[in-house]
Amino acid sequence: MIILNCNGLPLGDTVIRDNFIKMCDLELTRLQKDNNLGLMQLSQIYSLKEIKDSFRESYIANGILQTPENTESSKILRYLEYGGEDVRPTHLLSIVKHRLYDLVSVERS
């Protein structure tokens, strides 16, 4: 699953990935604090540890931040972003992506 196109970002791959993970953790904490319905529904399927671990399975290849296809991690990330059966979307990945772009002052297209 493609998460973010890193081409043109003025940071190294490791810095981008580490910031992505930290920002996802922060957004997840915010969603928890706000009792986000989508996160509560997803928490009935996956534990918070499993959700956090899904962020850590991301990697950068050819300038693209991604997670392995057809894995539990990609399934969890899809639930977070798009929702699914009995799970509302949180749009966590889009929020983090925009914040990451803002962090490095790259104009969004």
Image (cartoon, rainbow, N blue to C red):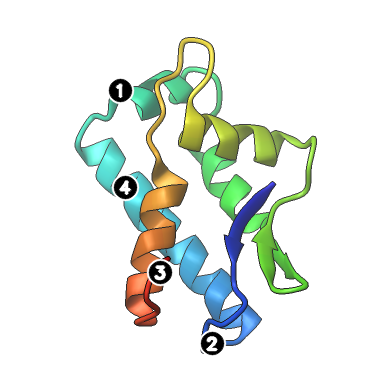
Amino acid type at circle 4 is Thr
Marked residue nearer the N-terminal end (2 or 3): 2
Marked residue nearer the N-terminal end (3 or 4): 4
Real-space CA distance between mark 2 and mark 4, rounded to the nearest whole angstrom: 25 Å
Residue 40 lies, with reference to residue 48, above or below; the image says above
Q: Which residue is mark 4?
A: 29
Marked residue nearer the N-terminal end (1 or 3): 1
Depth check, mark 2 against mark 1: the one in front is 2
66 and 25: which is toward the camera: 66
Residue 11 circle label: 2
Q: Which residue is mark 1?
A: 37
The C terminus appears in which quarter of the rendering? bottom left
Circle 2: is it few (<14), some (14-19), or many (20+) Cα within 10 Å? few
The secondary structure type at the circle numbered 3 is helix
Circle 4: is it few (<14), some (14-19), or many (20+) Cα within 10 Å? few
Real-space CA distance between mark 2 and mark 1, rounded to the nearest whole angstrom: 34 Å
| Residue 32 position within the rendered picture, expressed as x and y whole percent measured from the top left | 29, 37
Whether residues under marks 2 and 4 lie with C-beta atoms below 8 angstroms apart, the answer is no
Residue 100 circle label: 3
Give me the residue at 23% from left, 29% from top: 35
Give me the residue at 80% from left, 35% from top: 70
